[in-house]
Amino acid sequence: MRDEDIQAFVAAWHRAARRECDGYADQALAAEEQAELRALETELQTRFRQNAALLALARTPLLCAVICALHRRRRGLLPDTRWELYRSTLAMLLGSRDSQRGIRRPEGITMGLEEHQELLQSVAVWLVRAGQTQLSYQDAERQIEVAMRRLPQVSAQGTATTVLTHLLNRSGLLQERGDREVQFIHRTFQDYLAARAFIEDGSLLELLQNAPDERWHDTILLAVGHCRPHEIRKLIGGLLAAGEAASDRTRRAELYVLAARCFLDAVVVDETVAEEVESRVRAILPPHPMAPVEKLASLGPYVLPFLPGPADADSVTAQRVARLICAIGGPEAIPLARRYAPHESALVRLQFATSWSRFPAGPYAREVLA
């Protein structure tokens, strides 16, 4: 969703929540709840305008709805990072949701958050290793059965079939397709749970071995939030080494970008690691003709200081830099866009003229389009 779509979604979600209050028998309580929902809506829309990281998480309707629900449940307090957002979401879905609604032992099964996560992680890891987004009902049962061997309290309550039914009905994270295939409701949750399992099991090397496979990149990125500082160093160092060893120029750039994204997501990073990452990113800029511009753009404003100015770029280089600036977008990219806007190349000027939707409209119109 675009920025304006997210704002419209937030308004619609809170409007629906306020309508729910119309059915309250206590009119005073209904009015109080509706007033609070209006305040929460305004506050959340402001948070989205001010917090680019939070806005990036809300690009899909499902995650935007999750953020709205968490924001309401926590009375305006939201996690600061996406890992905390996922943790809070899992706690909301897998923790006390049923007990708070007075639902006792559905399917005759009762489990806590950790037990739910352990079972779901076994399915997530199987999917990531297989390079799939769904698995057969029988394969899901087998993964649940293996995980249940480590969970005696769950094993005592029923078979793998019963437990899988419980997860499909009550977890909110798994769903069954009509062709008896099981999948996560969103790929993000699959990758998050798999990443958690790999780090808990000490399987960092497996992540690095599969780093050249793009299907593993999201899992590797989400592993950062589960790593301790020494594991962060090993992960980023391994990705940089894999990039150096890559014979293909495009693949090398992809691995350097992946390492840089891990660095940007990490909370605690050594200064030497930061210098190594910057050195590799500078080495792949300005983007060569086959460079993955969308992947470079995923680094956001981090790459802007490393790009050459218009005086140092010929027309071909300027076109590639302009594409990257526009792909990054946002207010931070406006000063560099302004410097490139009067470039002698018509293609460069066209790039900036047609990419205005990537930037805040008012400032971009005044500083670049004008």
Image (cartoon, rainbow, N blue to C red):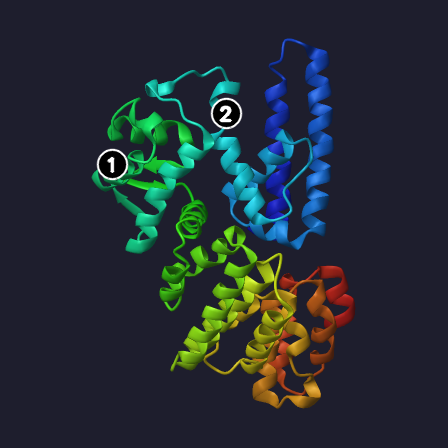
Furthest residue toward right: 366
Amino acid bearing label 2: Arg
Q: Residue at x 50, y 70 (%)?
A: 237
- Residue 224: x and y, percent? 52, 56
Q: Is residue 269 left or right of residue 132?
A: right
The quadrant in which residue 44 appears is top right
Amino acid bearing label 1: Glu
Q: Which residue is mark 2?
A: 97
Label annotation for residue 141 = 1
Query: Do the CB atoms of the residues marked 1 and 2 lie less than 8 Å apart?
Result: no
Q: Is residue 190 left or right of residue 280?
A: left
- Residue 220: x and y, percent? 45, 58
Q: Residue at x 64, y 69 (%)?
A: 271
> Reading the chain from its start, which is encountered first: label 1 or label 2?
2
Secondary structure of residue under mark 1? helix
Q: Residue at x 62, y 13 (%)?
A: 24
